[in-house]
Amino acid sequence: MMSCCCHVAARPCSPPSRAAAQVGHTKGDEPCSLLASSDTWRYIIFPATGECCRACNTTDYCGIVRPDWLQENSTYVGRSTIAGLTCDGWMKEGGEQNFYFADVDTQQPCLVSMKAA
């Protein structure tokens, strides 16, 4: 999992309620979620403290991922067991290594991970 990093200090806030996607991450030992919102911003939310911050937006190449983002220039990385599920994985280079794992039976996401290259 990646670390959560805000461009500004986290503070109590309410991100837009219309989220396009939400992915779990951690900041050290503190759980947080990355929310891609329809207002073009990604927010980092710290549920334990009720704080959040804007992380980046579409001008930072930090927009909502296109549904076909893995169809070109991605590499199959094999099968892994994630939370008891057998999942196929792919990696696509971008500003970082982007990994996507999906359940082999249902095609539902098992894990999305973005790591600095």
Image: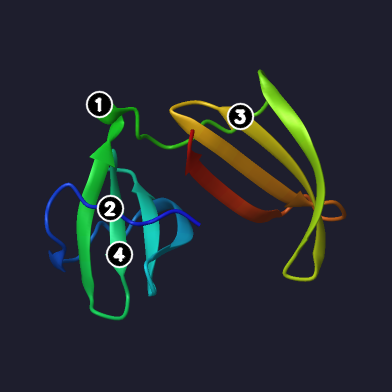
Could you tell me the amino acid type at mark 1?
Thr
**Color scheme of the displayed model:** rainbow
Secondary structure, mark 4, is strand
Give whichever of 7, 69 is nearer the camera: 7
- Give the residue pinned by disc 4: 45
Q: Residue at x 25, y 40 (%)?
A: 56
- Mark 4 or 2 closer to N-term? 2
- Give the residue pinned by disc 1: 59
- Give the residue pinned by disc 3: 92
- Give the residue pinned by disc 2: 5
Could you tell me the amino acid type at mark 3?
Lys
Q: In this view, does 37 lie to the left or right of 109?
A: left
Secondary structure, mark 3, is strand
The label number, if any, that marks residue 109 in the structure image: none
Q: Is residue 18 left or right of residue 114?
A: left
Give whichever of 114, 16 is nearer the camera: 114
- Mark 3 or 2 closer to N-term? 2
